[in-house]
Amino acid sequence: MIRKNPSGDRPVVHDSAFVDPTAILCGRVIVHGGVFIGPYAVIRADEVDADGHMEPVVIGAHSNIQDGVVIHSKSGAAVTIGERTSIAHRAIVHGPCMVGRGVFVGFNSVLFDCVVGDACVVCHNAVVDSRDLPAGSYVASALRIGPDTDLATIPKVPADAAAFSEDVMRTNNSLVQGYKQLGEAF
């Protein structure tokens, strides 16, 4: 469902993107080309700051927002998902937040008030809260990264995790084409 927010903003979705009919996109959302948005994902840009201003939620080209993902922002802050990034099933990205290019965010993970650098892998059930991750960081499953986390203890992405991330990207890019070909038969 594509719908306006109370400010009258309506999502802008590139013609080459696929948005599952059960997904909800609301407000000042910009979806670039080749994006896959899966079943029951919710992407809302509807809150404003104290001055009535709202930044958009932007989904970069060839990214995938999988089943049950929630992307939202507090008080109109920006949320940006970089190109070729995977946000896996039931993850939450809550702005202010900037997720770089080629990132993998695992099942049930939570990102809030952070910048996740390019090519990071945030594994399943991890939390990144109020702490920026440098490019190429690897956050293990169930790990919590917070303001006091010593980033020197965070390893770089291992080759197998990078390969997994790329495989997820490749798979979801092919789903875009498959579902677009189904068209009205879906």
Image (spheres, rainbow, N blue to C red):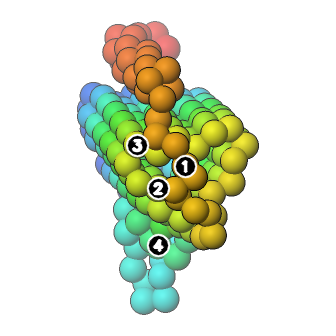
Q: Which residue is mark 3?
A: 136
Q: Residue at the location (61% across, 63% down)?
A: 149
Number of numbered callouts drawn = 4
* Element under disc 4: loop
Residue 4 % position (x, y): 45, 58
* Residue type (three-letter) at the residue carrying disc 2: Leu
Q: CA distance from mark 3 to mark 4?
A: 28 Å
Q: CA distance from mark 3 to mark 1?
A: 10 Å
Picture disc at residue 133 = 2
Query: Where 177 sits versus 9, above or below?
Result: above
Q: CA distance from mark 2 to mark 1?
A: 9 Å
Q: In front of the other: label 3 or label 4? A: 3
Q: Which residue is mark 1?
A: 154
Give the crowd class for mark 1: few <14, some 14-19, many >=20 residues within 10 Å. some
Query: Where 182 sits versus 63, above or below?
Result: above
Picture disc at residue 76 = 4
Query: Where 144 sits versus 186, above or below?
Result: below
Disc 2 and disc 4 in contact, CB within 8 angstroms: no
* Residue type (three-letter) at the residue carrying disc 4: Gly
Q: Quadrant of residue 29?
A: bottom left
Q: Earlier in the sequence, mark 2 or mark 1?
A: 2
